[in-house]
Amino acid sequence: MDSFVGRSITGLPTPALLIDLDVLEANIRTMGQLAADAGIAYRPHAKSHKQPLIAYQQIAAGAVGVCCTKLSEALVMLDAGVGDLLITSPVVTPWKIALLAKRAREARIGVVVDSLRNVQALGTACADAGSRLDVLVEIDVGQKRCGVAPDKASDIAIEVDRTPGLRFAGLQGYQGLLQLDADAERRLLGAKTANAILQDAAERVRRAGLPVDTLTGGGTGTIQIDIGMGGLNELQPGSYVFMDSRYASVDWGDGPIPFACSLFVLAGVVSTPMPGRAILDAGWKAISNDGGNPVPLDVRDARFRFAGDEHCALESDGPLGLSAGDCVRLRPSHCDTTINLYDHCFAFRGGEVVACWPIPGRGKTW
Amino acid sequence: MDSFVGRSITGLPTPALLIDLDVLEANIRTMGQLAADAGIAYRPHAKSHKQPLIAYQQIAAGAVGVCCTKLSEALVMLDAGVGDLLITSPVVTPWKIALLAKRAREARIGVVVDSLRNVQALGTACADAGSRLDVLVEIDVGQKRCGVAPDKASDIAIEVDRTPGLRFAGLQGYQGLLQLDADAERRLLGAKTANAILQDAAERVRRAGLPVDTLTGGGTGTIQIDIGMGGLNELQPGSYVFMDSRYASVDWGDGPIPFACSLFVLAGVVSTPMPGRAILDAGWKAISNDGGNPVPLDVRDARFRFAGDEHCALESDGPLGLSAGDCVRLRPSHCDTTINLYDHCFAFRGGEVVACWPIPGRGKTW
């Protein structure tokens, strides 16, 4: 696919995943500036991009490292030499724990826990491997996923602290359900509620005699609230690098959205059965739909219609002006699950392909 | 991943894609028998499995070759030596057409067309490459996707016939919207309507003086109707090898469903915040949702809840009886888009992993 570098994006085999480099770089710079201005550390979530090349750009812009959701995603970053990682969901099976402990010899790796049993298993594995893990206790701040209530935090923190090979590094409190709440007031209220729960947990741990170095959480949708509120000292935004159509519909309150869309799927027209209908070669295998339908760009008044796993249709009351072989950009409704469909993407500037980047974290779900 | 062969599936790193070999083999045998009994050729659609290993098993059971939706998917089969392919959607850009014509020197490849311009481009490319393509005219039998109306079929067929390097091989008429219609009567009526349109097109082509060797179409959901009706002489079923939860809800009319579910996602419990809630490590990056929610197996009365791109929750009014580290099988709602998330799958018999199979067609969407 490197043979397409230097050529127009319109010559790419479609469907193709495109990244507008100017916009990507601006998004990365903006986040770095927001965090620097506020004096808050940030550790972007690599689940969105799954690419060490982008992780390094984020680190160059000031990020302290990256977050990964799963162990296999973290190993991709580790293999590429990214040396400061946080795994944001528990690692619980013996095989995965042994692998995590072994690889922790190579870098600073943090992992979250929400049970005493998991702490003990991690400690045993680190002792066997001769390694060390940073461990953060996950608090359920309202998402009803993993995590414990604040009154359980200190017991687990103490267990971490007294376990050789483990360092109690702080607490995680992530409220994913808030990130895409379109209403600014509700998002603010939700973020404050989540923060109050996390601070309660932190206070209980401190009262038990342990310092709480890191309070990590937050995301793209609440980034300005998280910064303004001051409760978290490490932020985990992910989607800001790409911005999908759902984030575009979020009311950001005062001021403009600080980030712009850098991610597109380029689809090709394969058939134009009538003037008001074009069949494109991108279906659910090329662009995700868990966040709703993609948004067609480049064509006025075109409506998107599902047309099979490998096709979609654009329809219009008047002529679309498209012919077989033409290209149309689609804006994904959800960047994370769309990225996860591609083995590589094409970075472009001003319509010209400048690089083909691998996405080695694609499919790394365990 | 080969190191897991010979061990229990419960030791696999989760989420993992599982194929029950006994069921897969029975499904493949059953389809071979159905087609043989009816004396109809069948060319299973490889878009469902994307694996040459399964394509070869289908061919061994009597299939004449396989269908592929896109050129890149066909190249995966060609690279593995599968020598009789039909690409079921038009290939229209110069780069793809040149590649198709070049690779057509290696095998018997058919492709569908729905425009005169595409026929001319294919002909020029075959002349340049010194190769030959079988070309089928696609008829829109009601899906409103690619394809022409019956009265346009003969013009295109004649153009194919008079173009050196191309052989007019017949017509394709696929009605994908019918396949999952749960109502047996509606499915029967729809299949008959689609077939009438295809027969009309075939008659017009014959009247123009050309033989129509192949009439291809149909799918898993209409397989018994397609066979009974007798209009098609080559069938394209895909999902029958796996059967997803949507197909299970289809009313098959008289007699039992001839195929059973062979495909599962094995998910691992990472957290049990309360007795009636378990958080599993499989979200939309591990199992597709365009066909609806997955169906949890192995746990009585468990309700599925979305819990992020990389997690789901099982919830119950009573205790679930699950602990962190336990495994639960999920039945996909849609096999094609779930397969497309995985680089490999684990074939098992009676709970033991017997092979790790690559899925080289994964992500091959152009």
Image (cartoon, coloured by chain):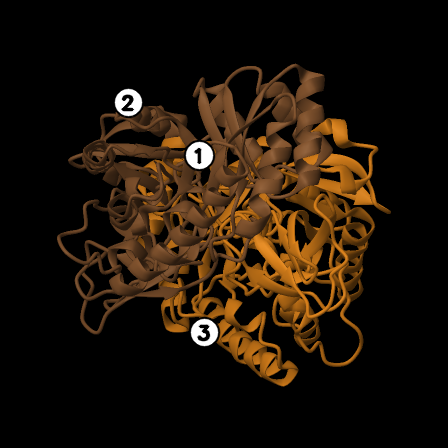
Chain colours: A brown, B orange
Count residues near mark 3 (Cα–Cα under 10 Å), then give few for <14, some for 14-19, many for 20+.
many
- Write down the residue under mark 1: A67
Outermost right residue: B350
Which residue is at 69% across, 70% downward? B317
Outermost left residue: A255
Return the residue nearer the eye: B327 or B201.
B327
Kind of residue at disc 3: Gly
- Write down the residue under mark 2: A60
Disc 2 and disc 3: Cα gap in Å? 54 Å
Residue A167, position in %: x, y?
55, 25
Kind of residue at disc 1: Cys
Vertical comparison of B195 with A49: above or below: below
- Write down the residue under mark 3: B142
Disc 2 chain ID: A
Which residue is at 58% across, 36% downward? A157
Residue B303, position in %: x, y?
65, 67
Image side of residue B316 versus residue A265, left or right:
right
Return the residue nearer the eye: B142 or B267.
B267
Residue B354, position in %: x, y?
81, 37
Image quadrant containing the C terminus of chain A: top right
Return the residue nearer the eye: B352 or A240.
A240
Vertical comparison of B47 with B331: above or below: above
In the image, are marks 2 and 3 on the same chain? no
First in sequence: mark 2 or mark 1?
2
Residue B9, position in %: x, y?
78, 41
Disc 2 and disc 1: Cα gap in Å? 15 Å
